[in-house]
């Protein structure tokens, strides 16, 4: 059936000249060129970096002359909080020590690394990333060592010749001499010119809790061997200061017991200058390596901070929504608690709340608008559901927007059965649903319009439930509740979960603060005077329902949600159709965010500026776009390229939030099927990627100024089948209730 032609070219982001597209393409090519050149240079610089030969040294690990001697070593620094405190303690007791530094930490805290050297302590190389898989290959280990070496040279002015592998306990604890630590990793490091330093006593202080200095002390005293040199492995930040507290007691006690603290270099028969010789001037390639590390470390830190902030915001959002949904919404819906935005309400507002609570009261007459374009499969079922409800509209207008299938024939046949109540407009294709709806507005006889998609059927009481809200003159629109008409595909189940989360949680909570962002096109009621004040349905975006909703909020109207006004709509059942639909929705959301950007953090329209737009930007666009990146970081962490702990926290958080949200979304459904929650994992790893891809595609389209159409899908007739089953009394195995309809004389 193809894509409809677009008439007006005033759409947000559209660039008729094509200038932006050319600029974006050139910028993309330039960016790819720069990244390619930069990556190539970085690889070449690491491969070409020179390493010094292994210095000659002698091990004294078994000599009695070194009995009752101790060398303190500290891994994983420098630490911005505890390294200075540790150095103060060591200087106070005149105790030497060696600090094995992580390259990325040196980039973050170069002044602390410099202070370690200036205070007379020894330093060593502890790789750049401290990854468990940094020795997966000789190339990987060499790159880690060379990168850290160049960073240390730049910021301390010395070349650190000592190297301690991360996670040493996995290799061998009991020997401090690298020559006796039998591993391929050690041979690779020595080949690169580094002396591998082990340890004879690992305090494992990294696993103690704050305030557990007694645990560290107990391990020290229990494992120390007075008959041989002792190399102690510790971490200055361990136990958030517990290591330093343990040393306050340990150092004086050992000195009193006759132990001597010596520098680690002494055990290798080397001087401080041998293991920390003055660094040679850095070459141009060395400078390139260092600048690359800065970009990597600081960029990663910024990105990690962004992920952390968004994670906190996400947790705060979902917690607030769920708590409000459980504790506040039930009372608001019963009319016991006024809206937060209605702390001082008018009599008409109270009257409107009562009318919505008891829809049996007489409601204002309404007009139903049904735009149709190639909807022969469902249009009869749509009209029948409207005409057979408990409150039959006084005027129903179907706009045949230039259909090329059998839609005109179906409408011609059924129009005879409903007489003047059903009015059919046949017009040339307008290019959009907005255009079709606007063409019918001059014919509307009532001040309340209910717009229903032509692939949708509604519940028997939907019209009365929606109309009852308009007793409040401030109400400009009311959103109904939408279900998929069929649950026969995984995509329909994805959409069911999405609908239930958005309607059972988001809309019910946001309605309290007049912050509903979308009145769905499938079923929504509008006050005609409010619609006219907003200029009618806009063709500026491809989501006319969201655009109009924001326009009403911009003008101070209230937008409410009526969960009892249900509709069942046909949803995509193939990957291609699903992606096309989501692409249009996402692009339209981008258009709306840009169109109403002036109201972001606005004081004049606080709910629009502080709730609706930030929620749309952060939780509908930014976070979904970052999900694949967070997952990618987790994969990099699993393979040891980055710190796994930094990646796994947001991953687990987002997954837990998805599960929690899905459970809460379907828990309040009368016909809820909690087995659908089991597909949340699929939703997390499949649906989220579809949304992310749609966002990326939308961003590219917006950047190049592409003209995006409203697109249509081939209809399957789901609504027709559902209605037929309802009329025949056929039970459905579905979490969805079936709209009650009565057959007409037709």
Image (tube, grey):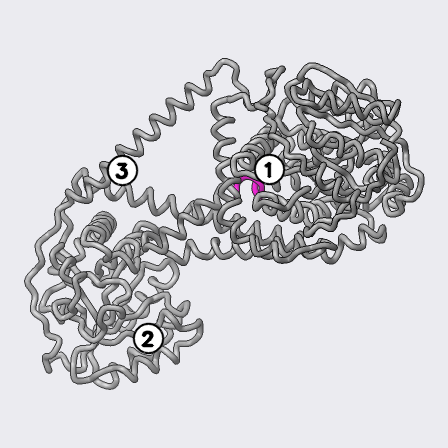
Total labels: the figure holds 3
Q: Where residue 451 sits in the image (x, y, percent)? A: 76, 30
Q: Where residue 627 sits in the image (x, y, percent)? A: 48, 46
Q: CA distance from mark 3 to mark 2?
A: 45 Å
Tell me if residue 377 comes above or below residue 664 in the rendering: above
Which mark identifies residue 264? none
Q: Residues within 10 Å of mark 2 (few under 14, many from 20)?
A: some
Circle 2 sits on which residue? 247
| Secondary structure of the residue carrying numbered label 3 | helix
Quadrant where the C terminus sits is: top right
Quadrant where the N terminus sits is: top right
Q: Which residues are magenta?
A: 617-623
Q: Main secondary structure of the magenta part?
A: helix
Tell me if residue 590 comes above or below residue 18 in the rendering: below
Q: CA distance from mark 2 to mark 1?
A: 66 Å
**What's the residue at 68%, 27% (across, down)?**
375
Circle 1 sits on which residue? 572
Tell me if residue 246 comes above or below residue 579 in the rendering: below
| Secondary structure of the residue carrying numbered label 1 | loop
**What's the residue at 24%, 86% (across, down)?**
257
Which mark identifies residue 39? 3
| Secondary structure of the residue carrying numbered label 2 | helix
Which of the marked residues, 3 or 2, is nearer the chain's N terminus? 3
Q: CA distance from mark 3 to mark 1?
A: 42 Å
Nearer the viewer's eye, disc 3 or disc 2?
3
Depth check, front residue: 729 or 521: 729
Q: Where residue 76 sits in the image (x, y, percent)? A: 31, 61
């Amino acid at each position: 059936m193809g894509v409809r032609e677009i008439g007006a070219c005033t759409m947000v982001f559209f660039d008729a000249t094509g200038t932006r597209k050319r600029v974006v393409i050139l910028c993309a090519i330039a960016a790819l060129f720069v990244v390619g050149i930069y990556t190539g240079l970085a690889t070449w610089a690491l491969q070409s970096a020179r390493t010094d030969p292994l210095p000659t040294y002698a091990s004294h690990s078994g000599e009695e002359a070194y009995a009752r001697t101790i060398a303190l070593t500290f891994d994983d620094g420098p630490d911005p909080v505890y390294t200075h405190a540790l150095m103060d303690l060591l200087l106070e007791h005149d105790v030497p020590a060696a600090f094995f530094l992580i390259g990325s930490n040196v980039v973050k805290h170069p002044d602390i690394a410099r202070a370690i050297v200036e205070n007379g302590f020894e330093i060593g190389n502890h790789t750049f990333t401290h990854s468990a898989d940094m020795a997966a290959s000789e190339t990987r280990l060499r790159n880690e060592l060379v990168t850290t070496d160049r960073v240390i040279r730049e910021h301390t002015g010395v070349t650190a010749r000592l190297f301690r592998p991360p996670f040493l306990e996995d290799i061998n604890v009991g020997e401090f001499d690298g020559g006796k630590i039998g591993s391929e990793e050690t041979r690779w490091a020595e080949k690169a010119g580094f002396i591998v330093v082990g340890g004879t006593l690992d305090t494992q202080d990294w696993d103690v809790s704050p305030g557990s200095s007694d645990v560290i002390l107990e391990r020290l005293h229990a494992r120390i061997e007075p008959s041989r040199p002792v190399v102690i492995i510790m971490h200055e930040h361990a136990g958030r200061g517990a290591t330093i507290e343990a040393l306050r007691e340990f150092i004086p006690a050992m000195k009193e017991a006759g132990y001597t603290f010596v520098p680690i270099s002494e055990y290798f028969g080397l001087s401080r200058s041998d293991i920390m010789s003055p660094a040679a001037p850095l070459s141009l390639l060395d400078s390139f390596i260092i600048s690359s590390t800065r970009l990597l470390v600081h960029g990663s830190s910024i990105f990690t901070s962004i992920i952390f902030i968004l994670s906190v915001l996400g947790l705060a959002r979902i917690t607030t929504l769920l708590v409000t949904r459980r504790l506040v919404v039930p009372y608001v819906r019963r009319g016991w608690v006024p809206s937060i935005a209605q702390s001082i309400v008018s009599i008409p507002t109270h009257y409107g709340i009562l009318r919505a609570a008891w829809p049996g009261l007489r409601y204002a007459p309404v007009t139903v608008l049904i735009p149709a374009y190639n909807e022969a499969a469902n249009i009869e079922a749509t009209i029948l559901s409207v005409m057979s409800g408990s409150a039959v509209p006084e005027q129903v207008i179907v706009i045949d927007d230039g259909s090329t299938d059998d839609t005109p024939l179906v409408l011609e046949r059924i129009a005879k059965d409903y007489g003047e109540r059903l009015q059919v407009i046949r017009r040339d294709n307008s290019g959009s649903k907005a255009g079709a709806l606007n063409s019918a507005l001059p014919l509307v006889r009532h001040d309340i319009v209910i717009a229903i998609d032509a692939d949708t059927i509604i519940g028997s009481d939907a019209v009365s439930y929606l109309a009852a809200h308009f007793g409040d003159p401030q109400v400009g629109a009311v959103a109904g509740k939408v279900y998929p008409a069929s649950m026969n595909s995984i995509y329909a189940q994805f959409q069911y979960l999405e609908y239930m989360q958005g309607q059972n949680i988001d809309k019910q909570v946001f309605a309290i603060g007049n912050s509903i962002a979308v009145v769905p096109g499938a079923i929504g009621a509008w006050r005609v005077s409010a619609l006219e004040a907003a200029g009618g349905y806009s063709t500026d975006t491809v989501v006319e329902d969201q655009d109009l909703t924001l326009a009403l909020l911009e003008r101070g109207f209230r937008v409410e949600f009526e969960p009892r006004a249900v509709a069942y709509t046909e949803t995509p059942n193939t990957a291609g159709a699903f992606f096309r639909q989501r692409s249009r929705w996402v692009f339209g959301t981008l258009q709306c965010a840009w169109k109403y950007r002036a109201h972001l953090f606005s004081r004049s329209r606080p709910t629009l500026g502080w709730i609706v737009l930030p929620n749309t930007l952060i939780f509908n666009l930014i976070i979904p776009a970052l999900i694949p990146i967070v997952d990618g970081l987790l994969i990099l962490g699993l393979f040891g390229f980055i710190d796994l702990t930094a990646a796994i926290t947001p991953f687990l958080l987002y997954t837990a939030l998805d599960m929690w949200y899905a459970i809460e979304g379907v828990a309040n459904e009368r016909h809820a099927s909690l087995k659908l929650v089991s597909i949340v994992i699929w939703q997390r790893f499949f649906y989220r990627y579809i949304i992310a891809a749609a966002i990326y595609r939308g961003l590219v389209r917006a950047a190049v100024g592409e003209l995006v159409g409203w697109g249509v899908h081939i209809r399957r007739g789901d609504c027709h089948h559902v209605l037929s089953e309802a009329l025949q009394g056929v039970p459905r195995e579905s979490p969805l209730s079936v709209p009650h309809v009565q057959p007409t004389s037709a």
